[in-house]
Amino acid sequence: MESSYSAADLKFTLFSILIIFMFSPAGNKLTSFICLFIYLIIFGFCFMIIVAYDPLDPSGNITIKWDVMSWTADGYVAAVTMNNFQLYRHIGAPGWTLGWQWAKKEVIWTMVGSQTTEQGDCSKFKGNIPHCCKRNPTVVDLLPGVPYNQQFANCCKGGVVSAWGQDPSASVSAFQVSVGLAGTSNKTVKLPKNFTLLGPGPGYTCGPAKVVPSTVFLTTDRRRKTQALMTWNVTCTYSQFLASKNPSCCVSFSSFYNETITPCPTCACGCQNKKNNCIMSDSKEAHRKGVNTPRKDNSPLLQCTHHMCPIRVHWHVKLNYRDYWRVKVAITNFNYRMNYTQWTLVAQHPNLNNVTQVFSFDYKPLVPYESINDTGMFYGMKFYNDLLMEAGPQGNVQSEVLLQKNKDTFTFKQGWAFPRKVYFNGDECMLPPPDTYPFLPSSANVNPVTFFTLVASALLVILSIC
Protein backbone atom coordinates (compact mmCIF):
# COMPACT_ATOMS: atom_id res chain seq x y z
CA MET A 1 0.00 0.00 0.00
CA GLU A 2 1.18 3.46 -0.57
CA SER A 3 0.56 6.97 0.52
CA SER A 4 -0.13 10.20 -1.29
CA TYR A 5 2.41 11.73 1.07
CA SER A 6 5.56 11.80 -1.06
CA ALA A 7 9.25 12.00 -0.26
CA ALA A 8 9.20 15.57 -1.57
CA ASP A 9 6.57 16.46 1.04
CA LEU A 10 8.77 14.92 3.73
CA LYS A 11 11.82 16.92 2.62
CA PHE A 12 9.81 20.15 2.46
CA THR A 13 8.40 19.62 5.96
CA LEU A 14 11.81 18.90 7.47
CA PHE A 15 13.33 21.87 5.64
CA SER A 16 10.60 24.17 7.01
CA ILE A 17 11.20 22.93 10.56
CA LEU A 18 14.93 23.59 10.30
CA ILE A 19 14.35 27.10 8.94
CA ILE A 20 12.06 27.91 11.88
CA PHE A 21 14.69 26.57 14.28
CA MET A 22 17.54 28.56 12.71
CA PHE A 23 15.71 31.87 12.83
CA SER A 24 14.15 31.48 16.27
CA PRO A 25 15.34 33.93 18.99
CA ALA A 26 18.45 32.91 20.89
CA GLY A 27 16.55 32.57 24.16
CA ASN A 28 14.15 30.12 22.62
CA LYS A 29 16.80 27.85 21.04
CA LEU A 30 16.55 25.18 23.72
CA THR A 31 12.75 25.16 23.65
CA SER A 32 12.79 25.07 19.85
CA PHE A 33 15.28 22.19 19.87
CA ILE A 34 13.14 20.13 22.27
CA CYS A 35 10.01 20.82 20.20
CA LEU A 36 11.90 19.92 17.03
CA PHE A 37 13.07 16.63 18.53
CA ILE A 38 9.57 15.67 19.73
CA TYR A 39 8.03 16.69 16.41
CA LEU A 40 10.48 14.56 14.44
CA ILE A 41 9.66 11.49 16.57
CA ILE A 42 5.90 11.99 16.18
CA PHE A 43 6.22 12.85 12.49
CA GLY A 44 8.34 9.78 11.80
CA PHE A 45 5.87 7.52 13.58
CA CYS A 46 2.91 9.02 11.71
CA PHE A 47 4.78 8.82 8.40
CA MET A 48 5.44 5.10 8.88
CA ILE A 49 1.72 4.57 9.49
CA ILE A 50 0.67 6.71 6.53
CA VAL A 51 2.87 4.91 3.99
CA ALA A 52 1.28 1.56 4.89
CA TYR A 53 -2.26 2.85 4.34
CA ASP A 54 -3.96 2.59 0.96
CA PRO A 55 -7.00 4.90 0.67
CA LEU A 56 -8.40 2.83 -2.21
CA ASP A 57 -8.14 -0.42 -0.22
CA PRO A 58 -8.12 0.63 3.45
CA SER A 59 -8.67 -2.86 4.85
CA GLY A 60 -6.41 -4.72 2.40
CA ASN A 61 -3.85 -7.06 3.97
CA ILE A 62 -2.45 -10.57 3.90
CA THR A 63 -3.47 -12.61 6.93
CA ILE A 64 -1.44 -15.70 7.83
CA LYS A 65 -3.38 -18.06 10.07
CA TRP A 66 -1.85 -20.91 12.07
CA ASP A 67 -4.33 -23.58 13.16
CA VAL A 68 -2.97 -26.21 15.55
CA MET A 69 -4.79 -29.36 14.43
CA SER A 70 -3.21 -31.90 16.80
CA TRP A 71 -0.62 -32.27 19.53
CA THR A 72 2.34 -34.64 19.15
CA ALA A 73 4.80 -36.14 21.62
CA ASP A 74 7.10 -33.12 21.36
CA GLY A 75 5.08 -30.45 19.59
CA TYR A 76 2.15 -29.95 17.26
CA VAL A 77 0.87 -30.19 13.68
CA ALA A 78 -0.44 -26.92 12.24
CA ALA A 79 -2.24 -25.93 9.06
CA VAL A 80 -0.88 -22.56 7.88
CA THR A 81 -3.20 -20.58 5.60
CA MET A 82 -2.28 -17.38 3.78
CA ASN A 83 -5.32 -15.28 2.78
CA ASN A 84 -4.80 -12.34 0.44
CA PHE A 85 -7.51 -9.84 1.39
CA GLN A 86 -6.13 -7.14 -0.93
CA LEU A 87 -8.60 -6.10 -3.59
CA TYR A 88 -6.18 -5.56 -6.46
CA ARG A 89 -2.67 -6.59 -5.39
CA HIS A 90 -1.73 -10.20 -6.08
CA ILE A 91 1.48 -12.15 -5.54
CA GLY A 92 2.95 -13.05 -8.91
CA ALA A 93 5.77 -15.34 -9.99
CA PRO A 94 8.17 -16.46 -8.57
CA GLY A 95 5.75 -16.42 -5.65
CA TRP A 96 5.73 -15.71 -1.93
CA THR A 97 8.51 -16.36 0.57
CA LEU A 98 7.56 -16.61 4.23
CA GLY A 99 9.98 -16.44 7.14
CA TRP A 100 9.87 -16.30 10.93
CA GLN A 101 11.97 -16.90 14.02
CA TRP A 102 11.23 -19.64 16.52
CA ALA A 103 10.68 -18.54 20.13
CA LYS A 104 12.66 -21.50 21.55
CA LYS A 105 14.63 -24.28 19.83
CA GLU A 106 11.83 -25.69 17.70
CA VAL A 107 12.49 -27.76 14.59
CA ILE A 108 10.33 -28.68 11.61
CA TRP A 109 9.92 -32.44 11.38
CA THR A 110 7.91 -32.52 8.17
CA MET A 111 6.08 -30.21 5.76
CA VAL A 112 3.28 -30.91 3.28
CA GLY A 113 2.53 -28.46 0.48
CA SER A 114 5.66 -26.39 0.99
CA GLN A 115 9.34 -26.62 1.86
CA THR A 116 12.09 -24.65 3.53
CA THR A 117 14.87 -23.31 1.35
CA GLU A 118 17.56 -24.59 3.77
CA GLN A 119 17.71 -27.54 6.14
CA GLY A 120 20.24 -26.06 8.54
CA ASP A 121 22.44 -27.97 11.00
CA CYS A 122 20.64 -31.15 12.13
CA SER A 123 23.80 -33.00 13.19
CA LYS A 124 22.61 -33.48 16.79
CA PHE A 125 19.73 -35.67 15.61
CA LYS A 126 20.13 -39.40 15.09
CA GLY A 127 17.61 -41.64 13.37
CA ASN A 128 14.84 -39.33 12.19
CA ILE A 129 16.32 -36.17 10.68
CA PRO A 130 14.10 -33.04 10.74
CA HIS A 131 13.10 -31.25 7.57
CA CYS A 132 14.61 -28.02 8.94
CA CYS A 133 16.65 -27.17 12.04
CA LYS A 134 17.18 -23.46 11.39
CA ARG A 135 15.96 -21.07 14.04
CA ASN A 136 14.76 -18.69 11.33
CA PRO A 137 13.35 -20.92 8.55
CA THR A 138 12.41 -19.59 5.13
CA VAL A 139 9.44 -21.31 3.48
CA VAL A 140 8.32 -21.36 -0.17
CA ASP A 141 5.39 -22.96 -1.95
CA LEU A 142 5.82 -26.13 -4.01
CA LEU A 143 5.53 -26.05 -7.79
CA PRO A 144 2.50 -27.42 -9.64
CA GLY A 145 2.64 -31.11 -10.50
CA VAL A 146 4.28 -32.44 -7.31
CA PRO A 147 3.25 -35.97 -6.20
CA TYR A 148 -0.11 -36.21 -4.44
CA ASN A 149 1.47 -37.31 -1.15
CA GLN A 150 3.27 -33.95 -1.00
CA GLN A 151 0.17 -31.86 -1.69
CA PHE A 152 -2.06 -29.98 0.70
CA ALA A 153 -5.30 -28.07 0.05
CA ASN A 154 -4.63 -24.75 -1.75
CA CYS A 155 -0.92 -25.50 -2.14
CA CYS A 156 1.50 -26.02 -4.94
CA LYS A 157 0.89 -23.01 -7.18
CA GLY A 158 4.48 -21.82 -7.22
CA GLY A 159 3.61 -19.19 -4.63
CA VAL A 160 1.24 -17.30 -6.94
CA VAL A 161 -1.78 -15.89 -5.08
CA SER A 162 -4.58 -13.94 -6.76
CA ALA A 163 -6.01 -10.70 -5.47
CA TRP A 164 -9.19 -11.17 -3.48
CA GLY A 165 -11.08 -8.71 -5.67
CA GLN A 166 -10.01 -10.51 -8.85
CA ASP A 167 -10.45 -14.19 -7.95
CA PRO A 168 -11.38 -14.97 -4.32
CA SER A 169 -11.10 -18.73 -4.84
CA ALA A 170 -7.43 -18.40 -5.86
CA SER A 171 -6.50 -15.81 -3.23
CA VAL A 172 -5.52 -18.52 -0.73
CA SER A 173 -2.31 -20.50 -0.25
CA ALA A 174 -1.76 -23.12 2.46
CA PHE A 175 0.58 -25.80 3.79
CA GLN A 176 0.97 -28.14 6.77
CA VAL A 177 3.90 -28.13 9.18
CA SER A 178 4.82 -30.55 11.96
CA VAL A 179 6.80 -28.75 14.68
CA GLY A 180 8.98 -30.51 17.23
CA LEU A 181 10.80 -29.51 20.45
CA ALA A 182 7.87 -27.20 21.09
CA GLY A 183 5.08 -26.83 23.58
CA THR A 184 2.44 -29.55 23.68
CA SER A 185 -0.50 -27.55 25.03
CA ASN A 186 -2.10 -24.13 24.71
CA LYS A 187 -0.19 -22.99 27.80
CA THR A 188 3.27 -24.20 26.79
CA VAL A 189 3.31 -23.30 23.10
CA LYS A 190 5.41 -20.24 22.27
CA LEU A 191 4.31 -18.30 19.21
CA PRO A 192 6.84 -17.73 16.40
CA LYS A 193 7.99 -14.13 16.02
CA ASN A 194 9.64 -11.68 13.57
CA PHE A 195 7.57 -12.76 10.57
CA THR A 196 8.68 -11.63 7.11
CA LEU A 197 6.89 -11.89 3.77
CA LEU A 198 8.20 -11.32 0.26
CA GLY A 199 5.53 -11.14 -2.38
CA PRO A 200 7.67 -11.80 -4.40
CA GLY A 201 9.78 -8.70 -3.66
CA PRO A 202 9.97 -6.41 -0.61
CA GLY A 203 7.22 -4.09 0.59
CA TYR A 204 5.37 -6.16 3.18
CA THR A 205 5.62 -5.54 6.91
CA CYS A 206 4.23 -8.17 9.26
CA GLY A 207 2.96 -7.59 12.78
CA PRO A 208 3.39 -9.96 15.74
CA ALA A 209 1.47 -13.22 16.03
CA LYS A 210 -1.71 -12.85 18.07
CA VAL A 211 -3.84 -15.63 19.58
CA VAL A 212 -7.41 -15.47 18.25
CA PRO A 213 -10.52 -17.62 18.75
CA SER A 214 -9.98 -21.10 17.31
CA THR A 215 -11.02 -21.62 13.70
CA VAL A 216 -14.22 -23.63 13.22
CA PHE A 217 -14.39 -26.20 10.39
CA LEU A 218 -17.33 -27.97 8.75
CA THR A 219 -17.10 -31.66 7.89
CA THR A 220 -17.53 -32.77 4.27
CA ASP A 221 -21.23 -33.50 4.78
CA ARG A 222 -21.59 -30.10 6.49
CA ARG A 223 -23.42 -31.68 9.42
CA ARG A 224 -20.71 -31.44 12.07
CA LYS A 225 -18.43 -28.65 13.28
CA THR A 226 -14.89 -29.17 14.53
CA GLN A 227 -12.38 -26.59 15.65
CA ALA A 228 -8.65 -26.06 15.85
CA LEU A 229 -6.97 -26.68 19.18
CA MET A 230 -5.35 -23.27 19.02
CA THR A 231 -5.20 -20.46 16.43
CA TRP A 232 -3.02 -17.41 15.96
CA ASN A 233 -2.94 -14.79 13.20
CA VAL A 234 -0.21 -12.68 11.62
CA THR A 235 -1.22 -9.62 9.57
CA CYS A 236 1.05 -8.25 6.83
CA THR A 237 0.48 -4.93 5.07
CA TYR A 238 2.09 -3.52 1.92
CA SER A 239 3.86 -0.20 1.42
CA GLN A 240 4.99 0.95 -2.00
CA PHE A 241 7.34 3.33 -0.20
CA LEU A 242 9.19 0.33 1.27
CA ALA A 243 9.02 -1.73 -1.93
CA SER A 244 10.85 0.73 -4.17
CA LYS A 245 12.10 4.29 -4.12
CA ASN A 246 10.80 4.79 -7.68
CA PRO A 247 7.40 4.11 -9.27
CA SER A 248 7.09 1.01 -11.45
CA CYS A 249 4.69 2.45 -14.02
CA CYS A 250 3.65 5.71 -15.62
CA VAL A 251 0.65 7.16 -17.46
CA SER A 252 0.32 9.06 -20.74
CA PHE A 253 -2.74 10.89 -22.12
CA SER A 254 -4.26 11.84 -25.46
CA SER A 255 -7.66 12.89 -26.78
CA PHE A 256 -9.68 13.28 -29.97
CA TYR A 257 -10.05 17.04 -29.39
CA ASN A 258 -6.35 17.85 -29.26
CA GLU A 259 -3.44 16.57 -31.35
CA THR A 260 -1.12 16.90 -28.36
CA ILE A 261 -0.05 13.61 -26.79
CA THR A 262 0.99 14.03 -23.18
CA PRO A 263 3.80 11.52 -22.59
CA CYS A 264 4.93 9.94 -19.36
CA PRO A 265 7.14 12.25 -17.30
CA THR A 266 10.84 12.00 -18.08
CA CYS A 267 12.63 9.50 -15.82
CA ALA A 268 9.28 8.72 -14.18
CA CYS A 269 10.67 5.42 -12.87
CA GLY A 270 14.26 6.58 -12.41
CA CYS A 271 17.03 6.76 -14.97
CA GLN A 272 19.88 5.49 -12.79
CA ASN A 273 20.43 2.34 -14.87
CA LYS A 274 19.56 3.71 -18.30
CA LYS A 275 23.06 3.26 -19.70
CA ASN A 276 23.65 -0.31 -18.53
CA ASN A 277 20.20 -1.81 -18.19
CA CYS A 278 18.21 -0.96 -21.32
CA ILE A 279 18.34 -1.74 -25.03
CA MET A 280 16.82 -0.05 -28.06
CA SER A 281 13.75 -1.71 -29.56
CA ASP A 282 15.34 -1.81 -33.03
CA SER A 283 18.71 -3.16 -31.87
CA LYS A 284 20.04 -6.67 -32.53
CA GLU A 285 20.12 -7.27 -28.79
CA ALA A 286 16.32 -6.94 -28.62
CA HIS A 287 15.89 -9.76 -31.13
CA ARG A 288 18.57 -12.20 -29.97
CA LYS A 289 17.62 -15.64 -28.71
CA GLY A 290 17.13 -15.79 -24.95
CA VAL A 291 16.51 -12.08 -24.44
CA ASN A 292 13.26 -12.93 -22.62
CA THR A 293 14.87 -15.38 -20.18
CA PRO A 294 14.43 -14.13 -16.60
CA ARG A 295 17.46 -13.77 -14.33
CA LYS A 296 17.69 -15.42 -10.91
CA ASP A 297 17.71 -12.01 -9.24
CA ASN A 298 14.70 -10.90 -11.34
CA SER A 299 16.66 -7.91 -12.63
CA PRO A 300 14.75 -6.21 -15.48
CA LEU A 301 15.96 -5.55 -19.01
CA LEU A 302 14.02 -2.53 -20.19
CA GLN A 303 13.47 -1.00 -23.56
CA CYS A 304 15.23 2.36 -23.64
CA THR A 305 12.62 5.09 -23.23
CA HIS A 306 12.57 8.61 -21.86
CA HIS A 307 10.49 7.45 -18.88
CA MET A 308 12.36 4.16 -18.17
CA CYS A 309 9.28 2.45 -16.75
CA PRO A 310 8.58 -1.26 -17.20
CA ILE A 311 4.87 -0.47 -17.65
CA ARG A 312 3.11 2.40 -19.40
CA VAL A 313 -0.65 2.96 -19.22
CA HIS A 314 -2.14 5.13 -21.97
CA TRP A 315 -5.56 6.75 -21.50
CA HIS A 316 -7.08 8.07 -24.74
CA VAL A 317 -10.36 10.00 -24.80
CA LYS A 318 -11.62 8.54 -28.07
CA LEU A 319 -15.18 9.63 -28.87
CA ASN A 320 -17.95 11.91 -27.64
CA TYR A 321 -21.62 11.06 -28.08
CA ARG A 322 -24.71 12.89 -26.90
CA ASP A 323 -25.25 10.76 -23.80
CA TYR A 324 -22.01 8.75 -23.68
CA TRP A 325 -18.27 9.07 -24.15
CA ARG A 326 -15.65 6.45 -24.96
CA VAL A 327 -12.14 5.88 -23.62
CA LYS A 328 -9.43 3.58 -24.95
CA VAL A 329 -7.01 2.12 -22.38
CA ALA A 330 -3.75 0.48 -23.46
CA ILE A 331 -1.10 -1.16 -21.26
CA THR A 332 2.38 -1.64 -22.72
CA ASN A 333 5.18 -3.77 -21.24
CA PHE A 334 8.73 -2.45 -21.74
CA ASN A 335 10.44 -5.23 -19.75
CA TYR A 336 12.02 -7.92 -21.96
CA ARG A 337 12.47 -10.34 -19.04
CA MET A 338 9.03 -10.35 -17.44
CA ASN A 339 5.48 -11.09 -18.44
CA TYR A 340 2.60 -10.28 -16.13
CA THR A 341 0.04 -12.94 -15.30
CA GLN A 342 -3.22 -12.00 -13.58
CA TRP A 343 -2.40 -8.32 -14.02
CA THR A 344 -4.72 -5.66 -12.58
CA LEU A 345 -5.28 -2.02 -13.48
CA VAL A 346 -7.08 0.32 -11.08
CA ALA A 347 -8.29 3.77 -12.08
CA GLN A 348 -9.98 6.51 -10.11
CA HIS A 349 -12.33 8.81 -12.03
CA PRO A 350 -15.68 10.37 -11.01
CA ASN A 351 -17.49 8.95 -14.06
CA LEU A 352 -16.61 5.35 -13.20
CA ASN A 353 -19.83 5.35 -11.21
CA ASN A 354 -21.64 4.98 -14.53
CA VAL A 355 -19.72 2.45 -16.64
CA THR A 356 -21.97 1.15 -19.43
CA GLN A 357 -19.68 -1.39 -21.08
CA VAL A 358 -16.06 -2.59 -21.02
CA PHE A 359 -15.22 -4.32 -24.27
CA SER A 360 -12.05 -6.42 -23.87
CA PHE A 361 -11.26 -6.43 -20.14
CA ASP A 362 -13.15 -7.69 -17.15
CA TYR A 363 -14.24 -4.88 -14.86
CA LYS A 364 -15.21 -4.63 -11.21
CA PRO A 365 -16.13 -1.48 -9.28
CA LEU A 366 -14.22 -0.94 -6.05
CA VAL A 367 -16.23 0.74 -3.34
CA PRO A 368 -14.03 1.06 -0.23
CA TYR A 369 -16.34 3.81 0.99
CA GLU A 370 -19.99 3.01 0.36
CA SER A 371 -20.96 6.59 -0.46
CA ILE A 372 -18.25 7.03 -3.12
CA ASN A 373 -18.16 4.99 -6.33
CA ASP A 374 -15.32 6.48 -8.37
CA THR A 375 -12.82 3.62 -8.52
CA GLY A 376 -12.76 0.49 -10.67
CA MET A 377 -10.49 -2.45 -11.38
CA PHE A 378 -9.76 -3.71 -14.90
CA TYR A 379 -8.18 -7.11 -15.44
CA GLY A 380 -7.67 -9.57 -18.28
CA MET A 381 -10.23 -12.09 -19.44
CA LYS A 382 -9.16 -15.61 -18.53
CA PHE A 383 -7.36 -17.44 -21.38
CA TYR A 384 -7.72 -14.34 -23.60
CA ASN A 385 -5.66 -11.41 -22.38
CA ASP A 386 -4.93 -12.12 -18.70
CA LEU A 387 -1.27 -12.53 -19.70
CA LEU A 388 0.66 -9.39 -20.61
CA MET A 389 3.61 -10.61 -22.68
CA GLU A 390 7.21 -9.37 -22.51
CA ALA A 391 8.32 -6.23 -24.34
CA GLY A 392 7.91 -6.53 -28.08
CA PRO A 393 5.13 -6.70 -30.68
CA GLN A 394 2.89 -8.79 -28.36
CA GLY A 395 3.70 -6.88 -25.20
CA ASN A 396 0.49 -4.90 -24.87
CA VAL A 397 -3.19 -5.30 -24.03
CA GLN A 398 -5.97 -2.81 -24.69
CA SER A 399 -9.67 -2.23 -24.29
CA GLU A 400 -12.32 0.43 -24.68
CA VAL A 401 -14.71 1.71 -22.03
CA LEU A 402 -18.12 3.26 -22.69
CA LEU A 403 -19.35 5.62 -19.97
CA GLN A 404 -22.69 7.35 -19.60
CA LYS A 405 -22.53 11.07 -18.99
CA ASN A 406 -23.75 12.77 -15.88
CA LYS A 407 -24.83 16.10 -17.32
CA ASP A 408 -24.35 17.86 -13.99
CA THR A 409 -20.64 17.04 -13.80
CA PHE A 410 -19.45 15.98 -17.27
CA THR A 411 -16.98 18.23 -19.05
CA PHE A 412 -13.85 18.02 -21.19
CA LYS A 413 -12.44 21.19 -19.64
CA GLN A 414 -9.38 21.33 -17.40
CA GLY A 415 -8.45 17.67 -17.88
CA TRP A 416 -11.62 16.35 -16.24
CA ALA A 417 -11.74 13.38 -18.65
CA PHE A 418 -8.48 11.93 -17.35
CA PRO A 419 -8.06 9.72 -14.25
CA ARG A 420 -7.04 11.06 -10.86
CA LYS A 421 -5.04 7.96 -9.91
CA VAL A 422 -3.86 4.86 -11.76
CA TYR A 423 -2.44 1.67 -10.24
CA PHE A 424 -0.88 -1.29 -12.02
CA ASN A 425 -0.56 -4.54 -10.03
CA GLY A 426 -1.21 -2.58 -6.86
CA ASP A 427 1.50 0.08 -7.32
CA GLU A 428 0.56 3.68 -8.05
CA CYS A 429 1.73 4.98 -11.43
CA MET A 430 3.20 8.41 -12.02
CA LEU A 431 0.84 10.77 -13.85
CA PRO A 432 1.96 13.74 -15.99
CA PRO A 433 1.78 17.25 -14.48
CA PRO A 434 -1.81 18.62 -14.75
CA ASP A 435 -0.73 21.64 -16.79
CA THR A 436 0.43 19.32 -19.60
CA TYR A 437 -2.91 17.53 -20.08
CA PRO A 438 -4.54 17.88 -23.53
CA PHE A 439 -6.82 20.92 -23.40
CA LEU A 440 -9.88 21.79 -25.44
CA PRO A 441 -8.99 23.78 -28.61
CA SER A 442 -10.44 26.98 -27.17
CA SER A 443 -7.99 26.85 -24.27
CA ALA A 444 -5.23 24.71 -25.70
CA ASN A 445 -2.88 27.61 -26.29
CA VAL A 446 -3.60 29.47 -23.07
CA ASN A 447 -1.89 28.39 -19.89
CA PRO A 448 -3.54 30.39 -17.07
CA VAL A 449 -0.41 30.45 -14.93
CA THR A 450 1.82 31.50 -17.81
CA PHE A 451 -0.67 34.16 -18.99
CA PHE A 452 -0.94 35.66 -15.51
CA THR A 453 2.83 35.72 -15.22
CA LEU A 454 3.20 37.55 -18.54
CA VAL A 455 0.57 40.15 -17.59
CA ALA A 456 2.19 40.77 -14.22
CA SER A 457 5.62 41.13 -15.83
CA ALA A 458 4.26 43.59 -18.39
CA LEU A 459 2.66 45.70 -15.66
CA LEU A 460 5.94 45.79 -13.73
CA VAL A 461 7.81 46.95 -16.85
CA ILE A 462 5.23 49.68 -17.53
CA LEU A 463 5.34 50.88 -13.92
CA SER A 464 9.14 51.00 -13.95
CA ILE A 465 9.12 53.09 -17.13
CA CYS A 466 6.54 55.49 -15.75
Image (cartoon, helix red, strand yellow):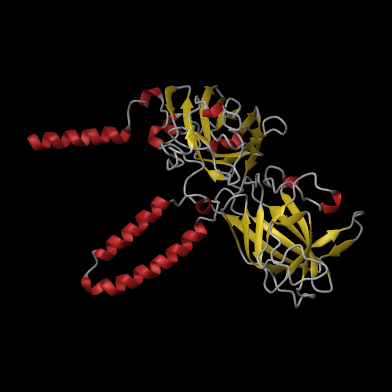
Question: Where does the image place residue 437, in percent across and percent down from the top left?
Answer: 42, 32
Q: Please, is residue 227 above or below residue 450 in the view?
A: below
Does residue 244 show up? yes
Q: Is residue 67 above or below residue 429?
A: below
Question: In the image, 454: left or right of 253?
Answer: left
Query: Nearest the camera: 223 or 291?
Result: 291
The picture places residue 213, in percent across and down from the top left corner, at: 75, 67
Query: Which quarter of the picture shows residue 445?
Result: top left
Q: Residue at x 42, y 28 (%)?
A: 438
Q: How many marks?
A: 0
Instruction: Identify the residue at image location x=64%, y=50%.
Output: 86
Residue at figure coordinates x 58%, y 25% from the top left: 393
The image position of residue 333, as x and y in percent, is 56, 33
Residue 327 in view: no
Furthest toward the bottom, the residue is 187
Q: Horizontally, is 292 left or right of 281 in the view?
A: right
Which image quadrant for residue 306?
Answer: top left
Front-most of residues 264 and 34: 264
Q: Is residue 229 above or below residue 307?
A: below
Residue closer to the observer: 306 or 15:
306
Image quarter (top left, top right, bottom left or bottom right) of the C terminus: top left
Is 113 placed left or right of 30 in the picture? Answer: right
Q: Is residue 211 left or right of residue 258?
A: right
Image coordinates for residue 303, horizontal then vertical, percent = 50, 32
Say above or below: 240 vs 266: below
